[in-house]
Image (spheres, grey):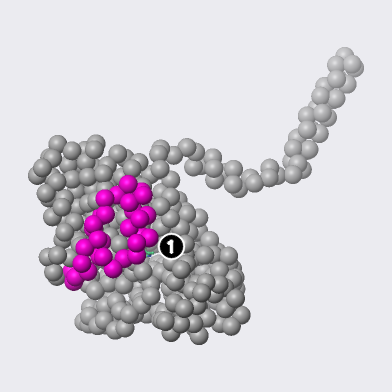
Amino acid sequence: MANAFRMSIRRFATTAARAASAATEAPTPNAYGIRVSKAQGVVDQLTGAIGNTPLIRLRHLSEQTGCNVLGKSEFQNPGGSVKDRAALYVVKDAEERGLLKAGGTVVEGTAGNTGIGLAHVCRARGYKLVIYMPNTQSQGKIDLLRLLGAEVYPVPAVAWENPENYNWQAKRHAERLLKEDPEHGAVWTNQFDNIANRRAHIETTGPEIWAQTDGKIDAFTCATGTGGTLAGTTRYLKDVSGGRVKSFLADPPGSVLFSYVSSGGQLNERKGSSITEGIGQGRVTDNLKNEVNELDGALQISDDKTIAMVYRCLDEEGLYLGASSALNVVAAKEVAEKLGPNHTVVTMLCDGAYRYADRLFSDKWLRSKGLRDAIPEHLQKYIVLE
Ligand SMILES: Cc1ncc(COP(=O)(O)O)c(C=O)c1O
């Protein structure tokens, strides 16, 4: 009896010691990373890897403003930009509407990231891709799209109103293909006015930001090309917060939207031009029209501020960003300053600087644009290209 009692005491002591040692054991290294990996699991093909990008706290700007200034790292998408989200949604929309069948063709007018996003999505899902673009674009862009499997047509750069504009040529190409081969289908995905683009951000970007900040976001800001990102993310954040989250347009010179938003829809003034690519608009697109009157304001960001922020983000945060992202970061800083300390402001880091390096870090190019002096002296060491 005494023996049995002693044994059970010993067993109890051993179990307790094991439990105590488990409690004091060092946490698994990379526990956070493992939790994220577990939640993500295995995704279905490349398209499953689009979105769910990290939200990065910009440490220096957060300290400077007393706010949390956060950037969504869209350059981590498989095609390298925020436009992967829109590309996936316009293709999914065409599939859902029965316009595309296996072996069918996607046709789009785009000079940049949407084409790259579409090229990846089309390869992954078994579609052909035809791209129309203005013939003012660099050979590098044409080559990249071709090596990703797209058929590319550079056409004379004419205004939107002209039937020979690259977008209308893309539309007619899709109509022609559909007539010739209705069995496989063909679609003009029409990123500017196809609201499946905005839906991508209502269903993915907005909810991700809300979840990542645990609902503690006060303001969102970003620039617009098609307007899909700003409109869709604004829609979700306003709805989920009962209108509490503020949203601001960030606009480069040369776009009409700054004057449109700040005049309450009265003006359509286009002043100046900008070095930024993929952003700035001459009209209110269908993607933007629902939310454009719900915005809480607009900021116009000069190229001087944008280029300085490209260099500052690289130096302070290690972030190698394209100009539209840098413009967004300037806007986020200005919104944070407007709101005052202890607010959380989110923006988009749309793509990296890789495709723009020969300009953004070239002494000659910066001088030709009158931007060299905009870069603070201590950051001029990054101007390493001739
Ligand atoms: C680099 C870059 N930033 C921002 C945008 C704007 O995004 P959205 O078309 O959703 O307005 C684009 C669009 O092409 C882009 O290429």
Whether residue 68 is visible here, answered yes or no, is: no
Q: Residue furthest right?
A: 2
- Nearest the viewer among 382 and 234 is 382
Q: Write down the region rendered in magenta.
A: 131-160
Q: Position of residue 319 (x, y in %)?
A: 54, 65
**Could you tell whether 150 is left or right of 183 in the image?**
right
Return the residue at label 1: 355
Task: Name the residue: 43% across, 62% down.
Answer: 355
- Nearest the viewer among 242 and 145 is 145
Asked if the stretch drawn in magenta spans residue 136, the answer is yes
Q: Amino acid at mark 1?
A: Arg
**View quadrant of ligand 1:** bottom left
**Could you tell whether 18 is left or right of 329 in the image?**
right
- Nearest the viewer among 145 and 307 is 145
SS under mark 1? helix
Task: Name the residue: 52% across, 69% down.
Answer: 69
**Could you tell whether 108 is left or right of 321 in the image?**
left
Instruction: Tell me if mark 1 has few (under 14), some (14-19) or many (20+) residues whose alpha carbon lies within 10 angstroms of its own.
Output: few
Quadrant of the drawing holding the N terminus: top right
Q: Position of residue 91 (x, y in %)?
A: 27, 47
Whether residue 184 is visible here, answered yes or no, is: yes
- Nearest the viewer among 48 and 24 is 48
Asked if the stretch drawn in magenta spans residue 125, the answer is no
Quadrant of the rendered image containing residue 208: bottom left
Task: Name the residue: 43% across, 84% down.
Answer: 370
Task: Name the residue: 22% across, 45% down.
Answer: 105
Q: Position of residue 275 (x, y in %)?
A: 38, 75
**Could you tell whether 21 is left or right of 341 in the image?**
right
Q: How many badges with numbers are in the image?
A: 1
